[in-house]
Amino acid sequence: MKLVPTLFLRLAVAAIAVATFALCAFALPAMWRAVPGEYPSATYVFYCILLAVYLSALPFSYALYQAWQVLSYIDKGKAFSLVSVTALKRIAYCALAISAIYAASMPFFYIWADRDDAPGLVIISMMLVAAPLTVAVFAAVLQRLFRQALGIKSENDLTV
C-alpha cells in the first residue's frame, strides 16, 4: 500500500515520456516535411519553432528522468536527502532551460501569428514560457523545503 501513490506517479511520468518520444519521433518529422508545401514563404519560421520544440525535448526528458529518481528515493525512504535536493535542483534548471528556449522562439511565434492573423498564437507562446517557469519555481520551493527537512533530520540524528 505504501508504494501505490508513487506507482501512480511513475505511471504518469512513463506516459509523459512515451508521449514525448512519440511526438519527437513521429509527429514532428511529419510536420517538418509538410512545412515547405503548406507555408512556402515562411518556411524558416516554422523550422525555427520546430527546432525549439526539439531542443526543449532534451531538458524535458532529463527532468522526467530526475522526477523518476525522486520517486525512487521516496520509495527507498530517502526523500529528505541530499540526492533528492540535487534532483529537484536539476529539475528546476531544466524547466528554466525550457522556458529560455521558448522565450528565444517567441519572435517566430509572433511572425507566424502575424502571417496567419492569429493573435492567440502569441498567447500560446507566452504560456509555453510561463508553464516551465512555474515548474521551476515549484521545484525550487520543494528543494528549499527538502533542504530544511534535511537540516532538521540531521539535527535530530545528532540529538539521539
Image (cartoon, rainbow, N blue to C red):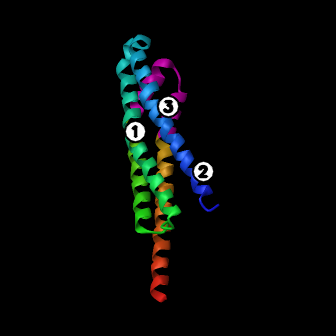
- Most common SS among magenta residues: helix
Q: Is mark 2 on a helix, strand or loop?
A: helix
Among numbered discs 3 and 1, the one appearing first in the sequence: 1
**Above or below: residue 29 compared with residue 85:** above
Among numbered discs 3 and 2, the one appearing first in the sequence: 2
**Separation of marks 3 and 2 at Cα, in angstroms:** 35 Å
Q: Is mark 3 on a helix, strand or loop?
A: helix
Q: Nearer the viewer, mark 1 or mark 2?
A: 2
Q: Which residue is drawn at 45% across and 76% down?
A: 151
Residue furthest right as drawn:
1
**Separation of marks 3 and 1 at Cα, in angstroms:** 18 Å
Q: What element carries label 1?
A: helix
Q: Are marks 3 and 2 in contact (CB under 8 Å)?
A: no
Q: Residue at x 52, y 46 (%)?
A: 13
Near mark 2 (Cα within 10 A), the count class, few <14, some 14-19 or many ≥20, is few
Q: Residue 120 carries which label?
A: none
Q: Mark 1 points at which residue?
A: 56
Per the rendered image, the range of residues in magenta is 106-128
Q: Position of residue 29 (x, y in %)?
A: 40, 23
Q: Which amino acid does label 1 sit on?
A: Ser
Q: Which mark is residue 122?
A: 3
Q: Name the residue under label 2.
A: 8
**Above or below: residue 139 compared with residue 107:** below
